[in-house]
Amino acid sequence: MNNPPPKTRGTWRAILFLFVLATLVPELLIGSTPLSRINQLIFQFPYYGSAALVIREVVIRLKLSRTGLLVLGLAFGVVTEGLALQSIFNPHFLNLDISYGRATDINWPWAIYMVGYHAVWSITIPITLAGLVFRDRKQESWLSRKGLGIYAVLFPIMALAFHAVFVKMSNFRAPSLPYAGAALVVALLIVAGLQLKARPALLPPLRGPTWFPGIVMFMVGISWLLLYGEIFRTPHLLHVTFNLALGIGLAAGFALSLRRWAPAGAPDQRQFSLIAGGLAANTAFGFVVVSGSTLDTYGQIGLVLLGGVGLCLLGRTLRAS
């Protein structure tokens, strides 16, 4: 691995910020781990946080593109939902009925939506937002070799721990062949992601108001999450083929919009707009996830307000810089 760029003092704040944010976005802000079960975050921080820090470090040291970041995020999603939790194989994961679209022992709509969710909301958005908050350290390595080694060991340990816990909880083990296939997919995604080096954008970002990428990201994000929610409906509103086709179409639209409206080299305000739109979609969908509990609903309202204030302050700082 390439020698890391030099670090400046105070990097621990950036490390702590990403370590925490990488868990809050995919767990607390979307209501998957609501306020009433906030104690569970203690075990989730080392899992999400270590993965985000390792992936960011690899991207910085190897000078990977944002596409490379997204592909490594996909690998993280397959590790999480396929190898650790086995949710893409278990039709009754957490006593849910996610058998919709199931074939060859795989819950296909769940697999596509959850792996895509992790790539964007668990990895890409937290890492990008951390870079905007700590702009003077955005291109720096944040971890020493020892620190990278610690987090690189901590992540698989936590993955194995979650695997053991969920096997015991559900008494479910995935069939050997699909499970091995998931491991192979992880390996292929990692190899592919490591080849995607950062290059100058072929086309400049399209002109338009800086808030427009956020609108696009919100619409794509909320559509993705609503399609994910549709797989829990009985009877289903959409045929599984149509559901998957829409999901793939949304993914393609997201990639195209990202490339044209807010490429990696675009000004920070466009990057911020994109991130804000994604977080807004994520948190808004949280009201669907936590519905039914007064405590969790009020907690979600509080998270919306706190997150909104934080994003407004960051947006003001970026405009002034």
Image: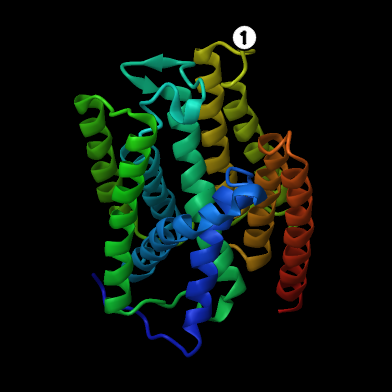
Q: Residue at x 32, y 78 (%)?
A: 4
Q: Where is residue 64 in the image (x, y as percent from the top left)?
A: 37, 61
Is residue 224 left or right of 107 when viewed as pictured?
A: right
- The part of the image, by quadrant, that contains residue 227 is top right
Please say if 177 is above or below 58.
above
Is residue 136 left or right of 301 when viewed as pictured?
A: left
In the foreground, 238 or 43? 43
Q: Residue at x 36, y 66 (%)?
A: 63
Residue beneath label 1, please? 235
Q: Residue at x 66, y 61 (%)?
A: 272
In the foreground, 231 or 160? 160
Q: How is the protein colored in the picture? A: rainbow
Q: Position of residue 239 (x, y in %)?
A: 55, 10
Q: Could you tell me which quadrant the C terminus lies in? A: bottom right
Please say if 109 is above or below 137.
above
- The part of the image, by quadrant, that contains residue 270 is bottom right
Please say if 242 is above or below 125.
above
Q: Residue at x 48, y 66 (%)?
A: 19
In the foreground, 80 or 240? 80
